[in-house]
Amino acid sequence: MTRLALSRRSMLAAFGGGLALSPTGPALAQAVFDVNPFRLGVTAGDPLPDGFVIWTRLAPDPLAYGSGMPKAPVAVKWEVAADRGFNTVVRFGEAIARPELGHSVHVEVEGLEPARPYFYRFQCGTERSGVGRAKTASLAGASVSAVRFGVAGCQAYEQGYYTAHRKMAEEELDFIFCYGDYIYEGRANPIYQSGAGPQDNTRVHLGGEIYSLDDYRRRYSQYTMDADLQASRASAAWFCTYDDHEVDNNWVGDIDQDGTPPEVFLLRRAAAMQAFYEFMPMRKSAFPRGAGMQAYRRAQYGDLLDVAFLDTRQYRTDQPCNDRFNANCPGIEATTAQVLGDAQEAWLLTNLDRSKARWKALAQQVMMMDLNRNTSGGQGVNTDSWAGYRVPRNRLLSHIRDRRIDNVVVLTGDEHQNYAGGLWLDGSQPEGAPIAVEFVGTSISSRGDGSDRGADYDRFMAVNPQLKFRNSQRGYVVCEATPTVWTTQFKVLDKVSDRSGVLTTRQTFAIEAGSNTLTPA
């Protein structure tokens, strides 16, 4: 239970203020909590050379309607320090946790030094949050010797523990890219099918399939209460994007998988976008507008790394072949098909043309390799990936090839498996050097424990000569870019069915600058 003492002056300030207030402004409420309100932890995001976003959410009872908070704005103090002990506080202030945003707080901290770690925390009343760590980006054009970051996503709560997040939190990364499927929208499912037959779920969703804003808030809260996930979120600044399960499986544009009228589905999408913003450390530029959000953006790390974070859901046309997996139909060649939409594609191509960074990364959601999913002598693709959209895929790859844009690395999720391979216009005939390289990260927990190699491993590799590596365990990816080489490590767990999973580095690949050749390291 939360008790608030509100003055008339405080209420007027609350309704007249912005998303953040000066530290000298009047407190909006004097809060007294029976339970610590920072049960969803803290995180930071979208680092720039002079700062980053810091996030928290007041939720003394995260799974209850309203998260145990009254319907009133509440003042939250924040501070950023140069050391974990907060002996040298360099920035501080007061923000407003608004009920319209589920009492979430997004503070855009500025005035920090580039390329160095900072520590942050929040206070509400007499209650204090845990401490988070975030590192600012390097100045654009500055000489940078190395950038090391994590890639993770696909964390179905019911299918495994988040041990991978705990391990990733120990890596001391410059940032983490979350490629989406932070939550899954399905109903509670106490039993799920695995290769060993029906088994008890590790954990179970609360409630049925989610549709309303309250539904999405509760699901995000259930996921974010996990201590291992909170450790990961507090360990480094995140760049967050969404994939499909933040809204509904395989949605694109205003289309869902159930044939819902678009105007009705957009209501659900609006609720999902608001919840995503509320729980992620996003800048105000991403503030949802109806069912839309400005999610694609760019990050620069000196002269070394230029990252484009893409949105492959919001502007995409409908999947061909009725969205069937392992399918082949004329719709794959549709000339009007879109993955990024005109505006985002033009933005991406312009950035690629102008970038002076040694490495250009495309951080996105669905696989770009046009893998053949048919191991029985036929041809079939995943129509929910770039392979189902031949014309926009080839347009992007042709641009990279024809403009001779070197050192392009694509970072992907969605598949719940690890993959590494080259990108050609036609991956079934990989002649000459690849145009770019793609690394696909496995899931944190989705599909359960998994295995090193599936039963179809040899057949799958045989029909996909562009592919250099495939693995079906859970884990995350760590990438390190230097001026001379890009290194990717695939980190995997032997199990996620309990918290004692053992982490190993399953495979490491290196790419020398100027060459798109994958070399096992």
Image (tube, rainbow, N blue to C red):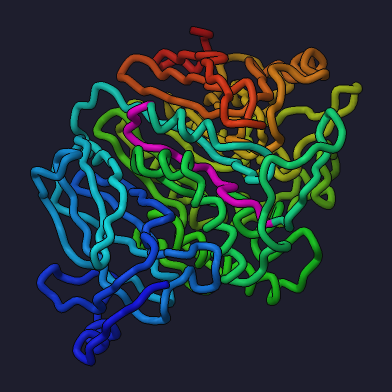
Who's the residue at 69% across and 17% down the image?
452
Say which of 408 and 234 sits in front.
234
**Where 265 sits versus 40, above or below?**
below
Q: Main secondary structure of the magenta part?
A: loop
Who's the residue at 43% across and 25% down the image?
479
On the question of residue 315 being in view, the answer is no
Please tell me whether residue 180 belongs to the stretch shown in magenta.
yes
Q: Position of residue 7 (x, y in %)?
A: 22, 88
Q: Position of residue 376 (x, y in %)?
A: 91, 22
Residue at far bottom of view: 8
**Where 254 sits versus 348, above or below?**
below
Q: In this view, does 493 lie to the left or right of 462?
A: left
Who's the residue at 51% across and 64% down the image?
275
Please tell me whether residue 96 belongs to the stretch shown in magenta.
no
Say which of 249 and 323 sits in front.
249
Look at the image and give the residue range highlighted in magenta: 171-185
Q: In which quarter of the image is the N terminus?
A: bottom left
Who's the residue at 58% across and 71% down the image?
214
The part of the image, by quadrant, that contains residue 394 is top right
The part of the image, by quadrant, that contains residue 507 is top right
Q: Position of residue 251 (x, y in %)?
A: 69, 57
Q: Is residue 423 left or right of residue 235?
A: right
